Image (spheres, rainbow, N blue to C red):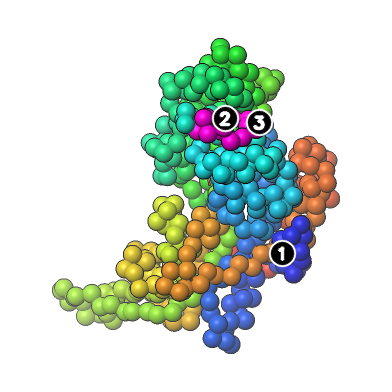
Amino acid sequence: MTSFNDFEFTFLEEGFCARDIVEQKINESTSSDDKDAFYVADLGDVLKKHLRWARTLPRVTPFYAVKCNDSRAVVGTLATLGAGFDCASKTEIQLVQSLGVEPSRIIYANPCKQVSQIKYASAHGVQMMTFDSEVELMKVARSHDNAKLVLRIATDDSKAVCRLSVKFGATLKSSRLLLERAQELGLDIIGVSFHVGSGCTDPQTYAQAIADARYVFDMGAELGYSMTLLDIGGGFPGSDDSKLKFEEITAVINPALDKYFPADCGVRIIAEPGRFYVASAYTLAVNIIAKKVNMKEQSGSDDEDDGASDRTLMYYVNDGVYGSFNCILFDHAHVTPIVHKKPKPDERIYPCSIWGPTCDGLDRIVELCTLPDRQVGDWLLFENMGAYTVAASSTFNGFQKPDIHYVMSRSAWQCMQQIHVQGMPALVEEQSPGNMPGHCGRGSTLELPAKPCATRVL
Ligand SMILES: *Cc1c(COP(=O)(O)O)cnc(C)c1O
């Protein structure tokens, strides 16, 4: 176990990847009764995302949304990489500051804050904060010494899976009133933010929101504000199996930024990606603790059949909707099981449902999927489990949260160190072909371990 900057992880042996560690943990468990669910989290994957971000959205500084996954290892990795942070509460600010992040790298991006927490931010130097109402302006005027306010505007999030603009965001009409009110109160408004909602299915939503932000900038200018910050929020997909790919979104964002906020306009652009950074870094392994075989009522006769076709299976596993799979309820996630023991080519598959360990009927992970016949003690794997999973899981019914094993390859580690010392801009420039740093980046992708991963990807 290595401890760096106050977070812990294990180095991957040369040529090994995170999946090998899953394999190793499962092997270790075969001889024992301890078959608790567990995670393997690859911090190198977080680094890869950071490089992908810098390459794809070079004008936009990421402020990681801590609520998505507040584990010290993830936040510490991103702190080392020089990212900023979107914090929504005192506790999140405390966490980020405990890792040595300076206040200028924090935006308090919760438009509706408790007064005592505004005071906390003020006392700890956190100045940037969002708002979307007049009451919030008055609270900030009374409770913060020198806030740099960012006006959160609503977006058309009708095409998003998780909508946010029903709860947050000022309309363009009320934006003018808010700007006027802020001026009366002598408050400094430095920019505009928005969030298109998560699971956004139409990249044009970003373009429209960027255009709306420009409109508010111009409105502010009429009132004498010269705003300098545009915050394009979160909602960027965290795995490549999403409907809309990251690069499809950025292909719309970049031209919109160039049109409405050209590089020489003096506006700094930030974003608040959450799931983008962590979803794919986490793999969850759960164990089958119980199983039922249901025979369907048979209609008609098919003599050759051995009866398997009218069988459905129910698997009960040791993490569920009250634990890691809360993402199904809260984040509208759809998860896909992978059997750990690979099916044989001719192995039958069955309609299956997968259930969590609690006594609640709501605790269902998958309503219907097809899997081969597996036994109690066998394992199922779920990939892309880093976002909105561990962050909101409970121990309802006495079921404990899975352990998380953090790993990183040495090449990822060296790359991270290099970024820590040189900063991202230097590194991204060096990434241009023909000018490669020793371990980082080769053309467009970061090629971590030179040797191929020891395990086949299932
Ligand atoms: C939740 C949230 C984010 C992160 O959203 P993702 O979909 O995880 O990228 C960013 N900004 C704000 C204000 C949020 O509430």
The response on whether ligand 1 sits within 8 Å of label 2 is no
Query: Does the residue at mark 1 contact the one at mark 3 (Cβ under 8 Å)?
Result: no
Residue sitting at x 80%, y 38%: 426
Q: Residue furthest top?
A: 222
Magenta span: 136-149
What amino acid type should be assigned to the residue bearing mark 2? Ala
Residue sitting at x 28%, y 77%: 294
Label 1 or label 3, whichever lies nearer to me, is: 3
What amino acid type should be assigned to the residue bearing mark 1? Glu
Gap between marks 1 and 3, in whole Å? 36 Å
Query: Which residue position is annotated with label 3?
Result: 146
Gap between marks 2 and 3, in whole Å? 9 Å
Query: Does the residue at mark 2 contact the one at mark 1 (Cβ under 8 Å)?
Result: no
Query: Which residue position is annotated with label 1?
Result: 8
Q: Can you tell which mark lies on residue 141?
A: 2
Q: Taking 406 as reference, is 338 left or right?
A: left
Q: Position of residue 387 (x, y in %)?
A: 53, 54
Vertical placement of 331 versus 423: above or below?
below
Gap between marks 2 and 1, in whole Å? 41 Å
Assess whether residue 294 is covered by the magenta stretch. no
Frontmost residue, 126 versus 246: 126
Q: Secondary structure at mark 1?
A: strand
Label 2 or label 1, whichever lies nearer to me, is: 2
Residue sitting at x 53%, y 76%: 36
Q: Secondary structure at mark 3?
A: loop
What amino acid type should be assigned to the residue bearing mark 3? Asn
Frontmost residue, 40 versus 154: 154
Mark 1 neighbour class, 10 Å CA radius: few under 14, some 14 to 19, many 20 or more: some
Vertical placement of 454 versus 126: above or below?
below
